[in-house]
């Protein structure tokens, strides 16, 4: 597993990160945390204010298929569970792409339901160590996803490794 280097993490398995957050200031703060703390920073990091626009960007190729999603479930168009359900229905995200729910407004029981539906982690906003917790969870999710991809994807031309 990659080592911690000067407070930053090396995450070669997550070069494309999708942020779905309706509050522009929060989206920029999430972007700043990710870009400043991950080494190397993601090659592509895009944010959209709702699931509908994220779906459209994925469908048109404006947004490459992500390696990880940060989701605020308190979006105006869809709330909580519906946001996650809509994300999980997109083909780009149905193949084990980690989804981290980042919210300060959902009840603990709603977070539990979202985790049971397919979200990979829940991180409450506004906690004292939010940035460190977020980066640690991104690292963990990307490392796990990379290991899973290595197992399920054939290595050799004929899949014989």
Image (spheres, grey):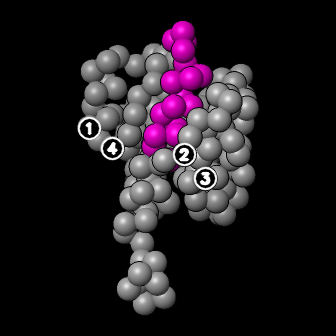
Q: Residues within 10 Å of mark 1 (few under 14, many from 20)?
A: few
Distance, label 1 to label 2, CA atoms, is: 29 Å
- SS at mark 2 in the image: loop
- SS at mark 1 in the image: helix
Residues at circles 2 and 3 in contact by the CB criterion of under 8 Å: yes
- SS at mark 4 in the image: loop
Question: Which of the two residues, 150 or 113, is positioned nearer the viewer here?
Answer: 150
Distance, label 2 to label 4, CA atoms, is: 26 Å
Residues at circles 4 and 1 in contact by the CB criterion of under 8 Å: yes
Residue lying at 51% horizontally and 31% vertically, measured from the top left: 136
- Label 3 sits on residue: 12
Distance, label 4 to label 3, CA atoms, is: 23 Å
Mark 3 or mark 1, earlier in chain: 3
- Label 2 sits on residue: 2
Residue lying at 27% horizontally and 31% vertically, measured from the top left: 113
Give the number of the mark in front: 1 or 2.
2
Query: Does 71 appear in magenta?
Result: no
Question: Which of the two residues, 1 or 121, is positioned nearer the viewer here?
Answer: 1
Mark 4 or mark 3, earlier in chain: 3
Confirm whether residue 79 shows in the render.
no
Q: Magenta stretch: give its range.
A: 126-142
Residues at circles 4 and 3 in contact by the CB criterion of under 8 Å: no
Residue that extends furthest to the bottom in the rendered view of this protein: 158
Distance, label 3 to label 1, CA atoms, is: 28 Å
Mark 1 or mark 2, earlier in chain: 2
- SS at mark 3 in the image: loop
Give the number of the mark in front: 2 or 3.
2
Query: Does 139 appear in magenta?
Result: yes
- Label 4 sits on residue: 118
């Amino acid at each position: 597993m990659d080592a911690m280097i000067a407070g930053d993490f090396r995450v070669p398995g997550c070069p494309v990160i999708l942020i779905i957050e309706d509050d522009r200031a929060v989206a920029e703060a999430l972007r700043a945390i990710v870009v400043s703390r991950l080494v190397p920073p993601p090659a592509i990091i895009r944010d959209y204010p709702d699931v509908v626009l994220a779906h459209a960007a994925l469908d048109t190729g404006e947004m490459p298929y992500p390696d990880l999603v940060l989701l605020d479930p308190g979006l105006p168009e869809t709330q909580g569970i519906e946001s996650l359900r809509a994300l999980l229905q997109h083909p780009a995200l149905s193949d084990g792409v980690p989804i981290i729910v980042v919210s300060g407004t959902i009840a603990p029981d709603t977070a539990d339901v979202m985790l049971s539906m397919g979200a990979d982690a829940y991180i409450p906003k506004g906690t004292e160590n939010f940035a460190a917790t977020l980066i640690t969870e991104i690292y963990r999710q990307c490392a796990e996803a990379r290991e899973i991809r290595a197992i399920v994807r054939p290595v050799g031309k004929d899949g014989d490794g």
